[in-house]
Amino acid sequence: MNIRIRSFAREDAREAAAIWNRVVEDGVAFPQLECLDEEGAAEFFRAQTYTAVTEDADTGELVGLYILHPNNIGRCGHIGNASYAVKASRRGQGIGEKLVSHCLEKARETGFRLMQFNAVVASNAPALRLYEKLGFVRLGVIPGGFHMKDGSFEDIVLFYHTLGRE
């Protein structure tokens, strides 16, 4: 599979929404409760500092995406945050690592000094391993910080990554 990461375009909205919505519907990773329709997806993805889509360059199929935006405002606006989604049928193929690595570079380019992840669900072992592999530092755990779709509560792990800016 030949993977290409590029900027989100309006014509990606339907496929990007389907990938995003699957994660929302699974109810084990994203905090959102509501799915995006095509128009809502176009607005949401365009409103981010940067939205990237990943496509199989051989077929043109979208296989993943990420959003990059400030973690907070004002005096904390130099800290970025991101969310990643990989098409369910393409998970475990290294696409997530490519998305996160690309996102770190884009965060540097757009002026962020750090990345902070506020709510990585503790049972999301692939994400935990990936973030640590890529140099993210584990800050701590918030017990029961994520309300799972099944009604249970799962711990969340906070991470940060410096982006090499002084």
Image (tube, helix red, strand yellow):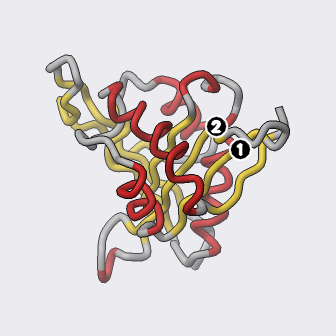
Pointer 2 with pointer 1, Cβ within 8 A: yes
Residue at 20% of width from left, 36% of height from top? 145
- Quadrant, the N terminus: top right
Q: Secondary structure at mark 2?
A: strand
Is 111 displayed left or right of 143 in the figure? right
Determine the residue located farthest toward the left in the rendered image.
151
- Nearest the camera: 42 or 28? 42
Question: Mark 2, residues whose alpha carbon is within 10 Å: few (<14), some, or many (≥20)?
Answer: many
Q: Secondary structure at mark 1?
A: strand
Against 133, residue 149 (above or below) is above
Task: Say which amino acid is labelled 1.
Answer: Glu
What label sits on residue 148 in the rendered view? none
Is 124 displayed left or right of 153 in the figure? right
Which quarter of the picture shows residue 156? top left
Residue at 46% of width from left, 54% of height from top? 82
Residue denoted by label 2: 63
Residue at 33% of width from left, 49% of height from top? 118
- Nearest the camera: 42 or 113? 42
Query: Could you say where residue 107 lies in the image, as x and y percent from the top left?
Result: 57, 67
Query: Could you say where residue 95 lies in the image, as x and y percent from the top left?
Result: 67, 36
Residue at 23% of width from left, 25% of height from top? 148
Residue denoted by label 1: 55
Question: Mark 1, residues whose alpha carbon is within 10 Å: few (<14), some, or many (≥20)?
Answer: many
Query: Upstream in the sequence, badge 2 or badge 1?
Result: 1
- Quadrant, the C terminus: bottom right
Against 33, residue 67 (above or below) is below
Measure how far apart labels 2 and 1 are at the Cα level. Answer: 5 Å
Task: Say which amino acid is labelled 2.
Answer: Val
Count of marks placed on residues: 2
Query: Could you say where residue 74 lies in the image, as x and y percent from the top left?
Result: 30, 82
